[in-house]
Image: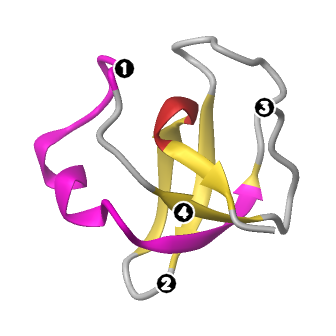
């Protein structure tokens, strides 16, 4: 999946990526908006910048995100 700027997403599960940090577990189930997409699919270094509602902006692995729209 390729994410695009302004797309609404849900952080729906814990990522298998090594960049996943324990504090990110509290973000599971939150919705946000893509602010800086990365066009490389399934690349462990390709993090997507998401503005999570009420939690600020974070760079997250792609495998924990799914589109809402």
Classify mark 1: helix, strand or loop.
loop
Query: Pointers 4 and 3 in contact (CB under 8 A)?
Result: no
Q: In this picture, which residue range is highlighted in magenta? A: 16-35
Q: Residue at x 74, y 18 (%)?
A: 41
Residue beneath disc 4: 10
Question: Which of the two marks, 2 or 3, is nearer to us in this view?
Answer: 3
Q: Quadrant of residue 56?
A: bottom left
- Picture quadrant where residue 6 is located: bottom right
Q: Is residue 51 above or below residue 37?
A: below
Mark-to-mark CA distance, 1 and 3: 16 Å
The label on residue 53 is 2
Q: Position of residue 62 (x, y in %)?
A: 58, 34
The local crowd at label 2, few if under 14, some if 14 to 19, many if 20 or more residues have their Cα within 10 Å, is few
Which mark sits nearer the N-terminus, 2 or 3? 3
* Residue under pointer 1: 17
**Quick one: SS at disc 3?**
loop
Residue at horizontal 24 percent and vertical 52 percent from the top: 24
Marks 2 and 3, how far apart in space? 22 Å
Say if mark 2 contacts mark 3, CB within 8 Å. no
Mark sitting on residue 8: none
Contact, mark 4 vs mark 1 (Cβ under 8 Å): no
Q: Is residue 50 left or right of residue 27?
A: right
Question: What kind of element bears circle 4?
Answer: strand
The residue wearing badge 3 is 1
- Which one is earlier in the sequence, the residue at label 1 or at label 3? 3
């Amino acid at each position: 999946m390729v994410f695009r700027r302004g797309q609404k997403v849900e952080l729906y599960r814990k990522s298998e990526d090594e960049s996943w940090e324990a504090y990110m577990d509290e973000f599971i189930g939150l919705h946000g908006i893509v602010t800086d997409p990365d066009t490389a699919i399934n690349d462990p270094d390709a993090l997507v910048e998401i503005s999570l509602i009420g939690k600020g902006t974070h760079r997250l692995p792609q495998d924990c995100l799914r589109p809402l729209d």
